[in-house]
Amino acid sequence: MTNEKMEQRLAAALEKTAPDDVNGVLSRCEERKGTVIPMTTKKMANRKWTTLVAACLAVMLLGGGGVFYQRANAVASVVSLDVNPSIELKVNRSEKVLVCTPLNEDAKDILADMSNGADLKGAKLDVAVNAIVGSLVRNGYLDSISSAIMISVEDKDTARAEKLQRELSNTVDGVLQTSEAKAAVLTQTLTQDAGREQQARENNISTGKAALVNHVLALNSALKFDELAKLSVEELKDLAEAGAPAMPIGKAAAAYAAEQYAGTTALDSVTAEVDSELDEFPAHYEVELHTAWGEFEYLVDAYTGKVISGQKDLPSTVSARNDTVKKPSQPVSPPAQSSHPAQPSGSADIGHAKAKSIALNHAGVSENEAYDMDIELDDEDGILVYEVEFKSGNMEYDYEINAATGAILKHESELDD
């Protein structure tokens, strides 16, 4: 029914209830000099009632619009994405983003191209998540096989939370497959909890990450919430799987320990890539230093910070090697032929086992997943290298590793035909 028809019906109903006695009223009124008594005719009365009804209808419509506005802007679900960057999305019942909030400095870098999240307001949730995960991939947060992203959905409606969780998991999987990223996807649904929300606010993390930290604390109450909150989702996941025996040193400390051991802390050109392996024995961090001389891998104990393996004092080692190469050599008799190239006297040799470990770790393949392993020591233009070949799944891997330093000189992978 239109508003016009509604007004007409209401006016007609009111007309029937009001007596039509204008002449009678006039006859009962005495004429008074100097006094004017304004009278209202039937037509004027109808106009007043129509105006009143229209005003009432306007109020009703405005009230209804207010309800619609409130529903469109009411938060129905809170979705958080955590790697180390923590990003929170508040959405309405229509799964449209009301606000996107970066919860730490790393998250601000991820959302820099999206006006710090403001550009995502009004977007469909799956579109916003697609954009955020794409930025995480471009910034290198999800390119390691041991990295992980956690999707948390908080909602009073459990069924709606589980539905969103499934949809978002598929969205993230799609982005990772398209970009060939190797990260694991963790998901969880949460109910509202005031205590957990306070923990999240105090530590600048999402409620989803706060729930994961509390899970680790349940395994070892001696650990501290604020210290665990600084770890990445990858570290927290591995720590939980290992039973949370102690507080790990963290990726930044592991990278610094490796650089100290390598003697490169004063070189701004050196960068580090760190993966946590807290669920392995011994628990450790794999630190890959990218230097002007090549890539060097270090294993750092996750709880003590001690360097387990890697080339010590790189600048001195490289300088000494270069000086040896530059010195004019005296004529000598040709050495006897050997089935394996001879290692220069006094130089280090990482050995077959270490070469295999370096190749497997770089490929993200565990030893029990690899087969057809072949390792040979060879001479490439005067440099001794380990040639490591193996297969895993439907892939074939080929590595050349410096026998003295452990640096990966060349690596290839292709489908196994």
Image (cartoon, rainbow, N blue to C red):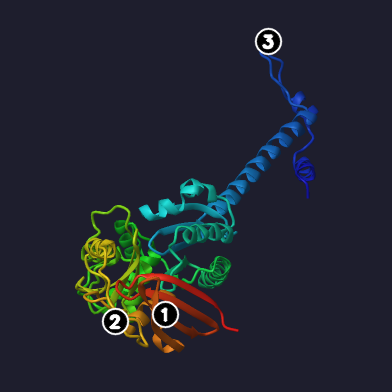
Q: Amino acid at mark 2?
A: Gly
Does label 3 or label 1 sit earlier along the sequence?
3
Q: Residues within 10 Å of mark 3 (few under 14, many from 20)?
A: few
Residue 339 place in picture, x, y as percent: 37, 88
Query: Image point 29% across, 74% down: which residue?
Result: 404
Up-down relation of residue 328 to residue 8 (above or below) = below
Say whether marks 1 and 2 touch (CB < 8 Å). Answer: no
Amino acid type, residue under disc 1 in the picture: Glu
For residue 33, the mark is 3
Q: Residue at x 75, y 39 (%)?
A: 18
SS of the residue at dot 3? loop
Residue 182 on image: x %, y %: 48, 72
Q: Secondary structure at mark 2?
A: loop
- What kind of element bears circle 1? strand
Q: Residue type at mark 3? A: Lys
* Residue 387, numbered circle: 1
Q: In this view of the protein, can residue 124 be seen by the observer?
A: yes
Which residue is found at the position 32% from the left and 60% from the top?
198
CA gap, disc 1 to disc 2?
A: 37 Å
Residue at mark 2: 243
Mark 1 or mark 2: whose residue is earlier in sequence: 2
Q: Is the Cβ of the residue at disc 2 closer than 8 Å to that at disc 3? A: no
The C terminus lies in quadrant: bottom right
